[in-house]
Amino acid sequence: MDGNVLTQLVEPVLITYNRSAKLFETLSAFYSAGWGDKIFHVLDNASTDETMEVVSSFQRDWPKLHYHRNTWNIGGNANIMRAVEIAQSEYHWVIGDDDAWLFAGAAELNVVLAEKRADIIRLGWLVDDASRGKYILANDLASSEKLFFSSTSMISATIIRRSLVTKCLPEAYQNISNSFPQLVAVMNGSESGAIVYSLNQNYMTHTPSTEPGYFFGDLELYASWYASARYLKQPYLKASFLREISYLMTMHRRGVFKQLSWFSKVALNAKGIGVPQSQYLLSMLGSGKGARAPVFVAMLAYAIMPGLLARWLRLIYRKLHGMPTVKLGESRSRL
C-alpha cells in the first residue's frame, strides 16, 4: 500500500509533555521506519522544555509532520481525547512518546488497514499468541483472553476505527477522571459486534515507567479501573474487566485470594506512609459489583490495622526484599 493510501486510513497523533528527549527518540524511530513521507501529528500539552524545537528539527525533512500545541496543560487523559480532534482519518491512533517501536509486521498492518475489516487493531502488547493473525469478535476476546481490555488500554498499541470512537465521545470525556477514556470505545465495541485483528508480530512494546510517582503506591489506579467498568452493561464482561486489573498487577496470577491479598497489601503499604485509602476502597466497593469480596476484606484489614503497625510491617517487608523505603509524608507527584 502506498503512502497516500495509508495516510487516508490513519494519521498517528503523538501526545507529549515535557519529555523532549523521549520525543526525539520516537520521532527518529518513525522517520527511520519510513513514515517521513506520511502525515504525522505531534500534540504538545503546553510543554516548557525543548519540545517545539525538537519537532521543528524534523519538519525540515518531514513536511507532513504537523505540530499542535495546547494553550494550557489539560492533563494527559484529557489530551488523549483532544487527539481525537486533530486527525480526520478513518482510523484513530494515539501514541505516547516513551514506547519502544519495533515496526515488525509493518506490511501486515498495511494490509489489514487496507482491508478495512477490523474495527480494532492490536499491535502486540499483552496479546495472547492464540489470537494473533486472526479476525475475532471483541466480545469473544473479552471472554477468552485474560488481558483483553488491558491490551487495548495502551494507546500506542491500539488502532481503532474513528466512528467507533466518535459515537461514544460524551462517555469517553466523562471517563477522563477515571484515567481510561480510551477504553470506552473498546467497551462499547465489545458489546456491539466490533471485530479485532491482532498482528502476528509486535509492532511496538511497552515497559511501564519505574520513575517515582508514576504508579502512586496506592489504590487510585485500581479505583479508576473499577469506576470505568460502569460503561459495560453485560455482567459477564464487567466481571472479566474487574478481574483484569489485579491479574495484570499481580504478575498474571488469578483467584479471589490473590486479589484479596494484593488489594490488602497495596492499601496497607499506602497506610504505612500516611496516604489515606478509604476513599478508594469505598469507590471500589461501590463500583465493583461482582468483584466486591476482595475489596471488602481489604477494607476490613485497612480499618483494623493501626497506622504505626502498618508502617513497621512495611519497613520490614521492604528491607527483607531489598527495596528502598519512602519516608512518611513524601510527596507523590504525578508525572
Image: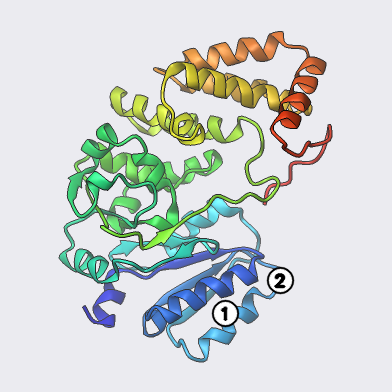
Circle 2: residue type: Asp
Circle 1: residue type: Val
Which residue is drawn at the image coordinates 60% and 51% (left, top)?
Answer: 209
Element class at badge 1: helix
Furthest residue in direction bottom, as rendered: 60
Which numbered marker is on residue 330? none
Q: Quadrant of residue 318?
A: top right
Which residue is drawn at the image coordinates 49% and 55% (left, top)?
Answer: 80
Q: Quadrant of residue 300?
A: top right
Answer with left or right where residue 78 lies relative to residue 158.
right
Residue 20 location (% of width, % of height): 64, 71
The CA distance from mark 2 to mark 1 is 12 Å
Q: Residues within 10 Å of mark 1 (few under 14, many from 20)?
A: many
Residue 205 location (% of width, % of height): 44, 57
- Residue 187's place in the image compared with 112, above or below, is above
Answer with left or right where residue 279 lies relative to residue 98.
right
Q: Quadrant of residue 76?
A: bottom right
- Residue 25's place in the image compared with 145, above or below, is below
Residue 237 location (% of width, % of height): 31, 29
Sooner in the amino-acid sequence: mark 2 or mark 1: 2
Q: Residues within 10 Å of mark 2 (few under 14, many from 20)?
A: few
- Residue 295's place in the image compared with 44, above or below, is above
Residue 221 location (% of width, % of height): 57, 36
Which numbered marker is on residue 49? 2
Q: Nearer the viewer, residue 325 or 76?
A: 325
Task: Determine if residue 143 is in view.
Answer: yes
Q: How many marks?
A: 2
Which residue is drawn at the image coordinates 35% and 28% (left, top)?
Answer: 240
Which numbered marker is on residue 55? 1
Answer with left or right where residue 63 lies relative to residue 48.
left
